[in-house]
Amino acid sequence: MTATATPGMTAAPTPFHRLLAVEARKLVDTRSGKALVLVLAGLVPAAVAARGAVSGPELQALVNAAGIGPGTLLPVLGILTVTGEWSHRTALTTFTLEPRRGRVLAAKFLPALAAAVAACVLAVLAAVPATAVTAAVQGVPAVWEVDPAALLGWAGVQVLMVAEGLGMGVLLLNAPAAIVICLASPMVWAVVGRLGSAGATLAEWFDLNTTTGPLMSGDLSGGGAARLAVSVLVWIAVPMAAGAVRVIRGEVR
């Protein structure tokens, strides 16, 4: 016998933990995601080894070096996460299965941000043995001192970079355009910052890479916090909010 649907009955909503599990799996089960993970797996030890050879066995320096790869590639992974439904034309299927689009976006954002935190932990875990090995190879004592404020600030910057990628991705819904903007903006702002005092002032307030400098060094003050807040508003909060409105209210084809 076949069951018949009772009039007025609706399907049970998809549990949020299931959405999270699905979106977290999407981070690494695509060809692009796997390629980025493999590149990161090779880039992190290479960066640590190169920095150790130059600066010696200093844990703080090696941690910063280990974060270069994740800080560059994880925003790309975040962009691919939020734009994949549109580039592969599966958004209609996704939003049919889960009509509450805000929940879908949240399920996409959280794994990417969690991946940034996990990458910071792995970077520290990679830098600790690398510091010991470098000290043994060079025959010099290792420098284990780490500034907690700088370490937390460095981790916060990694999360902000991924959030920027998510914001650009959900705003544009076009992976190539979002990737170009995120990767090219530091170079553009470097040029703007050299265009006299006006350009330098603009860069001080609106260049996310400049405003996160005090946070990464653990020297964030009142003025630095204000500049950081302005750049986060421009590059993360506004694009993410506008993109969320676009996805939630827009027509899906």
Image: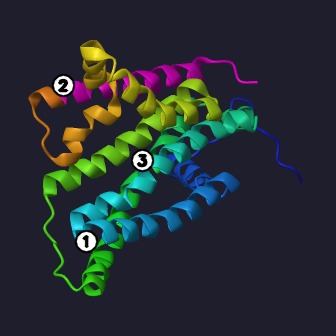
Say which of 72 and 190 sits in front.
190
Residue displayed at 48% across by 19% down: 242
Residue 237 counted in the magenta span: yes
Q: Is residue 45 above or below residue 180?
A: below
Which span of residues is magenta-colored?
225-253
Q: Quadrant of residue 21?
A: bottom right
Mark 3 or 2, closer to the camera: 2
Q: Amino acid at mark 2?
A: Ala
Image depth: mark 2 or mark 1 in front: 1
Task: Please give the label number shown on residue 20.
Answer: none
Q: Amino acid at mark 1?
A: Gly
Mark 3: few/some/many CA within 10 Å (<14, 14-19, 20+): many
Quadrant placement of the C terminus: top right
Three-letter amino acid code at disc 3?
A: Leu
Q: CA distance from mark 3 to mark 1?
A: 31 Å
Question: To which residue does mark 2 refer?
Answer: 226
The residue pinned by badge 3 equals 113
Image coordinates for residue 122, horizontal then vertical, percent:
38, 66
Q: Position of residue 134 (x, y in %)?
A: 30, 79
* Mark sitting earlier along the chain (3/2): 3
User: Mark 1 sits on what residue?
Assistant: 56
Compare residues 135 and 110 and report the one nearer the observer: 135
Note whether 223 is above or below 24 in the view shown.
above
